[in-house]
């Protein structure tokens, strides 16, 4: 979310460990919020759970106050439902219903370091094609993170995401929005698109930390920005899915800083 330009930052192993603290808080918060998703819950209810957990864990919500085209972002989470892709502001009157899907995007700062992750959650039973969309999008995230290797190239990440999604059916991969560098600021260079050419772009080196975040639509890839200046929706109003993790490039392979369990095995399997 919220693309911002700055220089590329390379972290020491000690700084990556500090980022892991922020990442774990984000991962724990997302797990807590995802468990609260059910019909009748508002997206503002979810936001309050997230803010309480982040502040109770010694962190600061990353998203609150981020400058926007009209107003600063006012909430802890982005909660984007169904055709909403990213950046939707939580509201008391946005109540989840059976069959919805909701993207929950969360960021936190601990001791000056950021973590950023997102998950799309089903509200009760959802349509089979939408369930497949979620599975494909989440798997493409893992493929993209597995490409975050020392000696690789930036284009390898988008290529991994794109090639997997294309292999699974006629999905729309959102362009113009994507991942980003992260560290002492939430959004840093480089921008990481979810399409790419293998071997293209800058060389990846140990100490780079990225937020990789595929956004995939059940319909066409085209998007539309709403009047609030934040919410991005699918132009054809088809459902969308969004998954994200913060991943560090290290000599020992990709380190998924916002995942709680099982990430080492998952990365090893893909490698």
Image (cartoon, rainbow, N blue to C red):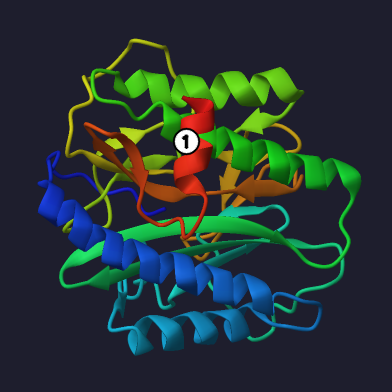
Instruction: Give the residue at x 40% y 57%.
Output: 258
Label 1's element? helix
Q: Nearer the viewer, residue 134 or 43?
A: 134
Q: Nearer the viewer, residue 251 or 41?
A: 251
Res 139 → quadrant = top right
Q: Does residue 66 appear anywhere in the picture?
A: no
Q: Position of residue 43 (x, y in %)?
A: 63, 77
Q: Is residue 114 above or below residue 75?
A: above
Q: Is residue 242 left or right of residue 155?
A: right
Res 135 → quadrant = top right
Q: How many numbered markers are drawn? A: 1
Q: Does residue 268 appear anywhere in the picture?
A: yes
Instruction: Give the residue at x 48% y 47%.
Output: 263
Q: Is residue 139 left or right of residue 239?
A: left
Q: Nearer the viewer, residue 227 or 46?
A: 46
Instruction: Give the residue at x 34% y 10%.
Output: 199
Q: Is residue 246 left or right of residue 136?
A: left
Instruction: Give the residue at x 56% y 69%.
Output: 31
Res 222 → quadrant = top right
Q: Is residue 114 above or below residue 144?
A: below
Q: Which residue is mark 1?
A: 267
Q: Is residue 182 above or below residue 45?
A: above
Q: Residues within 10 Å of mark 1 (few under 14, many from 20)?
A: some
Q: Nearer the viewer, residue 69 or 131?
A: 131
Q: Position of residue 25 (x, y in %)?
A: 38, 71
Q: Is residue 198 above or below residue 99?
A: above
């Amino acid at each position: 979310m919220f693309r911002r330009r700055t220089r590329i930052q390379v972290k020491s192993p000690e700084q990556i460990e500090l980022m892991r603290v922020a990442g774990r808080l984000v991962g724990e918060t997302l797990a807590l919020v995802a468990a609260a998703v059910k019909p009748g819950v508002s997206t503002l209810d979810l936001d309050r759970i997230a803010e309480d957990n982040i502040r109770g864990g010694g962190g600061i919500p990353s998203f609150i106050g981020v400058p926007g085209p009209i107003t600063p972002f006012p909430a802890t989470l982005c909660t984007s439902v169904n055709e909403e892709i990213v950046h939707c502001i939580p509201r008391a009157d946005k109540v989840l219903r059976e069959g919805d899907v909701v993207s929950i995007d969360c960021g936190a700062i601990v001791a000056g370091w950021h973590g950023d992750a997102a998950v799309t959650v089903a509200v009760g039973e959802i349509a089979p094609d939408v369930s497949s969309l979620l599975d494909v999008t989440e798997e493409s995230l893992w493929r993209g993170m597995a490409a975050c290797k020392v000696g690789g190239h930036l284009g390898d990440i988008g290529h991994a995401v794109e090639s997997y999604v294309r292999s699974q059916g006629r999905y729309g991969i959102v362009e113009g929005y994507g991942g980003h560098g992260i560290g002492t600021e939430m959004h840093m260079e480089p921008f990481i698109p979810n399409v790419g050419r293998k071997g293209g772009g800058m060389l990846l080196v140990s100490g780079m930390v990225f937020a990789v975040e595929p956004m995939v639509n059940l319909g066409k890839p085209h998007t539309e920005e709403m009047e609030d200046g934040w919410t991005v929706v699918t132009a054809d109003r088809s459902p969308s899915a969004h998954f994200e993790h913060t991943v560090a490039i290290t000599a020992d392979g990709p380190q998924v800083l916002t995942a709680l369990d099982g990430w080492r095995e998952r990365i090893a399997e893909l490698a």
